[in-house]
Amino acid sequence: MNSFSRHLLLLILILLPFNASASQTSVPFFECRGCTDAQMQQAALSEPGLGVRIVYNLSSAHIVKYNVYREAGCLNRPQESDEARGDVVDSKSSCNQNPTRVIDWMPVDTELLAPFAVMVELYHSNPILLATGKAEVNIRDVGYDPGNPPQRFDPYQVAYDRISGTAFRNFMEAATQFFNDHTYLSLSNNELSSLVYDGWAPLRNATITLSESPEVSLDLSRIQTDATVDFKDDNGAYVRIKFTHQESTNYTAEFVGAWDAAGAALPTDEEAHAAGFHRTYRGGRGGEAAYSMGIFLHNNGFGGDFFIPNPSCRIITLSCIAEPVPFASCRIDCKP
C-alpha cells in the first residue's frame, strides 16, 4: 500500500466517528440525579460512544439534549515505512491519534416535554412509583363491565383456583383489561394511570431528531417501564400482578403471587390439600390473618373450630388435615 492509499484510509477512519450519529439507532435517555448543569454535561460526555443523548435531573426539572462527536485530527503524520522507503515527509507535521470528544447542546424535542413533566410531578408526589413501577389498586375496581353486573374477586379465591379453577382465569383476564383501559385505571389509581399513559407511552412512541440522520426512538432501558400492581381487598390480602408492555399488543399480565395481610402466601387448592399444610404467624396481625385463612378454607370444604387468637399469642399456627376427605379440618394453635 502506497503512502496516498494509507492516508486515504486514515481519512475514512477519522471521518466515520465524526459522523457517528448518522448510524445511531436509538438515543440514550438517563438521569443525572441532583446534578448541576456542568455535571449533566459531563455525564453526557462520559456516556460511551458518540452521538445524541438526553440527560435529565428530576429534582431541578431540567432536561438537556446533547450531541457528542469527535474532532477530526490531521491526516499527514509521517509513518516509519515512509521514511524507510525514502519518501519525502514534513518533519513538522503531526497527527492527533486521540481526537478530542466534543459536546454540543441541541434543542430538546418538544414531544418529550409533557411526559418529562409527568415524571417530575411523580418524583415529588410518589417517587417510589416512579422508580419501581409498583402500585396498589383496590381489587373491587377490577371486573367492571358496562351493562353487566360487576365481577367480584377475592384474593384467597384467586390464589386457591390458580391451578384449575375459573376464578383465577377470570381475574387475570379482568385485570389485563382493567390495566389496558386508560379510563378505568385512572379512576382507580390516577398516579399509576398518569405514569403509564402520560409518561411511559409518549416516551416509548417518541421520535428523536438527530443531527444528520432520520429520527430514531429513545433507549428507555435505564428507566422503569413495566408495572407491578398489588390488587388488595379491604382486609389487606392481595394478588400481585406484573404488567409488561409488548410491542405488538398493550400490556400482558403475569401472576407473581398472593399473600394475606400478614404476608403469608395464600394457598392453591392443591397446596391446602397436601399433607402437612400449615401457615405460621408471629403476633401483630397474625391472629386475624390466621382466622381469615381458616374461615376461607372452612368455606371450601374444611371443617374446624376457628377463633381469633388472643393478642398475647407470640406464635400462631394454622394447620390442616386433608384426609380423610369427609373429615378434612383445620385448627389454630397459639404459643404465648
Image (tube, rainbow, N blue to C red):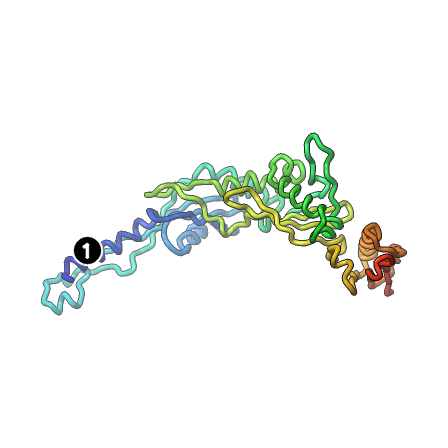
| Picture residue at 55% right of the left edge, 47% below the top | 225
Tell me the SS state at disc 1: helix
Task: Classify the position of the C terminus by image quarter.
Answer: bottom right
Residue 128 visible in the snapshot: no
User: Which residue is more in the foreground, 4 or 75?
Assistant: 4
User: Which residue is more in the foreground, 117 or 145?
Assistant: 145
Please provide percent x and percent y for residue 103. Answer: 36, 49
| Picture residue at 71% right of the left edge, 43% below the top | 138
The part of the image, by quadrant, that contains residue 10 is bottom left
Label 1, residues with CA under 10 Å away: few <14, some 14-19, many ≥20: few
Please provide percent x and percent y for residue 142. Answer: 69, 40
> The disc labelled 1 sits on which kind of residue?
Leu
Question: Which residue in the structure is indicated by mark 1?
Answer: 8
| Picture residue at 59% right of the left edge, 43% below the top | 122
Please provide percent x and percent y for residue 314. Answer: 83, 63
- Decide: is 134 above or below 331: above
Q: Is 307 on the left-hand or right-hand side of 269?
A: right
* Number of disc labels: 1
Residue 1 visible in the snapshot: yes
- Decide: is 89 above or below 260: below
User: Which residue is more in the foreground, 291 or 83?
Assistant: 291
Q: Is 114 on the left-hand or right-hand side of 1?
A: right
Please provide percent x and percent y for residue 146. Answer: 68, 31
Task: Classify the position of the N terminus by image quarter.
Answer: bottom left
Outermost residue, bottom side: 84
- Decide: is 114 above or below 40: above
Q: Is 228 on the left-hand or right-hand side of 205?
A: right
Q: Is 119 on the left-hand or right-hand side of 156?
A: left
Outermost residue, top side: 147
